[in-house]
Image (tube, grey):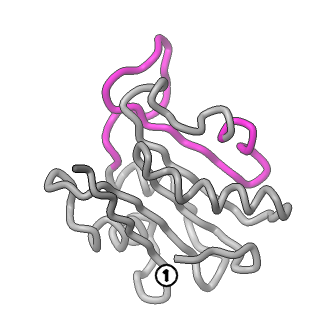
Amino acid sequence: MVWEPEHGGPLLLVAGGSGLAPLMEMIRLRAAVGSDAEIRLLVSSRSREDVIYRAELERFAGDGLTVVHTLTVSRPPGWTGYARRVDADMLREIGPARPRSRTPSSAVPRPSSRRWPRPWWLSSGATRACGWAFPGIRTLQISIDAS
């Protein structure tokens, strides 16, 4: 999937660990050109310390970019955010209710692992979980060799 600022939004981006790297390029481009495209980014990490690009994400957050974290293994005292693996309910809660663009997008990088559901389920499932019909929606699945 290629996203350019003129494509607009909303975008629902979902990443775990180093899968955030390719999505950061979209976020950096959005900031560089002053785009107001709505982006909702869900980052799944084992702990707060494992969140890559944390300082950069904190700088970019706001003004149409919503960053949501789910910490799956350990959480700091007083953590009130998500504390589980990404699921359809979480995507429904985070994703935009209705796309304003004719081509909303979701991007779901994932490692190549038998622990994960099949790639098509992650990509199309992310859009369906948010109440979007799958046809006409751009999705991306990136497999990262975890070996």
In the displayed structure image, the side of residue 20 where residue 4 appears, left or right: right
- Residue 81 percent coordinates (x, y): 48, 31
- At horizontal 31% and vertical 26% (from top left) the residue drawn is 73
Residue furthest to the bottom: 136
Comparing 59 with 90, the one in front is: 59
Quarter of image, res 92: bottom left
Comparing 115 with 66, the one in front is: 115
**Vertical order, 27 against 54 (above or below):** below
In the displayed structure image, the side of residue 12 where residue 147 appears, left or right: left
Residue interval drawn in magenta: 57-86
- At horizontal 50% and vertical 48% (from top left) the residue drawn is 42
Q: Main secondary structure of the magenta part?
A: loop
Magenta-drawn stretch contains 71: yes
Residue beneath label 1, please?
A: 137
- Residue 95 percent coordinates (x, y): 52, 59
- At horizontal 73% and vertical 44% (from top left) the residue drawn is 60
In the displayed structure image, the side of residue 68 where residue 47 appears, left or right: left
Residue furthest to the right: 34
- At horizontal 71% and vertical 43% (from top left) the residue drawn is 61
